[in-house]
Amino acid sequence: MKKSITRRYFLGGVGLTLAVVATPAGFRFLAGRKTDTLSEVLRPSIWVRITPDDRVTVLMGKSEMGQGIHTALPMIVADELDADWNQVRIESAPVREEYDDPDAQQGHVTYGSTSVRHLYEPLRRAGAAGREMLLQAAAQRWDVPVSECETSQSQVLHERSGRAFSYGQLCEAAARLPIPENPRLKEKSEFKLMGTAVPRLDIPAKVNGQAQFGIDIFVPDMLYGVVARSPAYGAKVLSYDEPAAMKVEGVRYVGEIKRGIGICADTLDAAWKGKEALNVKWDKGVQPDLSDELLDSIFRESLDKEGASARSDGDVEDALSQAHKQVQAEYFLPYLSHATMEPMTCTAHVLPDRCDVWVGTQGQTNTLQKTAQITGLDPEQIYIHTTYLGGGFGRRGWTEWVEEAVELSKATERPVKVIWTREEDMQYDSYRPGNSSRIVGGLDEEGRLIAWSHKIAASSIIASLFSKIGGDSLLFRVIGFFRSVDAPAVEGLENIQYEIPNMSVEYVEVKTPIPVIFWRSVGNSHNAFTVESFMDEMAHAAQKDPVEFRLQHLQHNPRAHRVVEVVAEKSGWGKPLAAGRALGIASHYSFGSYVAQVAEVSVDETTGKIKVHRVVCAVDCGPTVNTDIIRAQMEGALTMGLSAALKEKVEFGDGGVRSANFFDYHLLRMSEAPDEIEVHIVDSDGEIGGIGEPGLPPIAPAVANAVFSATGARIRRLPMTPEMVLAAIEQSQSA
């Protein structure tokens, strides 16, 4: 938890309001106040309420997209507060500054596996302070020492007399008390909820169909909006037939907006037919020859260009020149789509003095700012209603579909619902950057790494952000880590976990018209593959076991060392396997957490098909809140990473995106998922880490390393399609 936080948090309700301010000197509690009406309780500065009906309501400034934070965050409050879990409720918080992420200048966002990390300490302190105030209020009523009172299940108990008050009975009296500046936080041994597998609060509504996603929004007098967009990057409109579109029954509006030509109609089908009737003609765009073949040559050539230094430790050139053995390898990874289950959708209603936006978003602050720009309304006149997200992965932090809905609502003076088709979602995504890497490593006579030179060529997410949101916006200031090199591109390299005395990292920006943004685990998703694949290559060159080699270079990193030890033990590393099976290991540090994985695979050397039979995962994320959520996130992340490793690649041609849908952008099928996934949570008192993303990076290299163990073929290009595997096997046999 950073100590330069300057945000205000409140625990309150009809009677109890508690403010927690984080300052450079630490956390400070402000005076509470009595609130008399629900409208006062709901003012934007209040994020937790205790009300006379014994309810504890936690207002969430974070989006629930399947990662379980709408359960984990209330658990933190409830545990320190000693609240009855059955009386805990969650609400989405208004998009106002008081509910911003605790980290400085981050706004109302959900990304980077930061929700629990950033809120863990403030929520604990708020719950603890509320508990102490309730104890004191009860002690005063009974005229007994506070030390004789205890809390349990939303009650204050006086065991000696057998008396009890519920929190609801005490909340108004507690609000009049001074707020403790330094409430006692529970010891780990005192937790009743944290560290257990509490069932998630959002699951019942998602199972019975009551959960509301962006696509579920319906507003009276609503129109459906679609947009005709350019088929090639930067293509301009040459002509279109507006009268023909307006003749389609149900079409109410046709007009140009920022990203193309908008059509609004009474039904979605009518809107689609109107779009077809437009018969838009486009020019060839800014780079008509853009294709997979061109991109492949661009990434290869970029590795021969001079780049910007992202890291420089020791003297790499001198160390390499003196190395006993030197190894070089090049790796290539494709652009990836986010491929969320729910395509992009938003409903907007612009009025002269108000605008409502219903959207599943990871970036409420950016959504608010963009809406204000389009409508000219003050932020206080704009209401962002955050629904559940049908998958995020970084994609829903942006606003193209929101802007379309707001523009069309403003033009038609009616509510407008924009729903992208799967094809539109695929073609107009902003992608995980494609990239290439060249690594040169040197070993001394004892087989220890003494030098590592790493050059990475990739499109710049920071440059793409400039084009999307501008350098002056709050959301750009969120990216506080940007510098002369693209920080997302080298993520995972600037803090590599291994002890290497001489190391350099160099970044070459690849400029194409393809938009790129964050994708689950960001740069770690490709850098873990290159680093962990190359670590295996260096272990082979050193003639050492891959686990032994890693542990040798983690002597001063006990948490990383431990997860490698645990995963090796739990996977049965070194023990006999079934015929045709092989193991591969990979370990990676990201988002404050340490994860190691072992994949057990077999390879059909006649077809090139890889089968992942088993994955064993060890994770150290520091303090644990909900163990079931941790396991689920590890399973989901590694499955998504396996899909990317074996199947996924965006294809380009004719100046734009060639991939159209899941028939040519392939995802992992259930039949291709591992037969068995084991997740082992390593007990740790280390600093708390994130959990939504760290499970993804190690799986691709773990599988690739297992393929090498099984076949002797090194996989240096993703995805590991059967064709790619056969080519690698042929190359290894001819070498």
Image (spheres, rainbow, N blue to C red):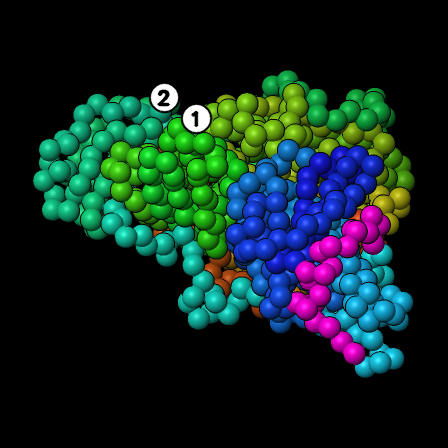
Q: Position of residue 49 (x, y in %)?
A: 63, 57
Q: Residue at the location (53% across, 46% down)?
A: 94
Does 522 lie within the magenta span? no
Give residue 730's position: percent from left, percent from top.
56, 46
Q: Position of residue 526 (x, y in %)?
A: 61, 40
Q: Which residue is mark 1?
A: 513
Whether residues under marks 2 and 1 lie with C-beta atoms below 8 angstroms apart, the answer is yes
Q: Dot 2 lies on which element?
A: loop
The amino acid type found where label 1 is placed reads Pro
Q: In the image, what residue type sits under mark 2?
A: Val
Q: Give the residue at x 28% y 23%.
A: 236
Helix, strand or loop for disc 1: loop
Depth order, front residue of 35/185: 35
Residue 46 seen in the current view: yes
Magenta extent = 163-183
Q: Would you place residue 381 above or below residue 68 in this image? A: above
Position of the N terminus, as image quadrant, is top right
Task: Say if the magenta span includes residue 175.
Answer: yes
- Tell me, yes or no, if residue 624 can be seen here: no
Which quadrant, please, contains the C terminus? top right
Q: Is residue 215 left or right of residue 3?
A: left
Q: Is residue 712 above or below residue 412?
A: below
Residue with the mark numbered 2: 286
Among the 4 quarters of the image, the one containing residue 279: top left
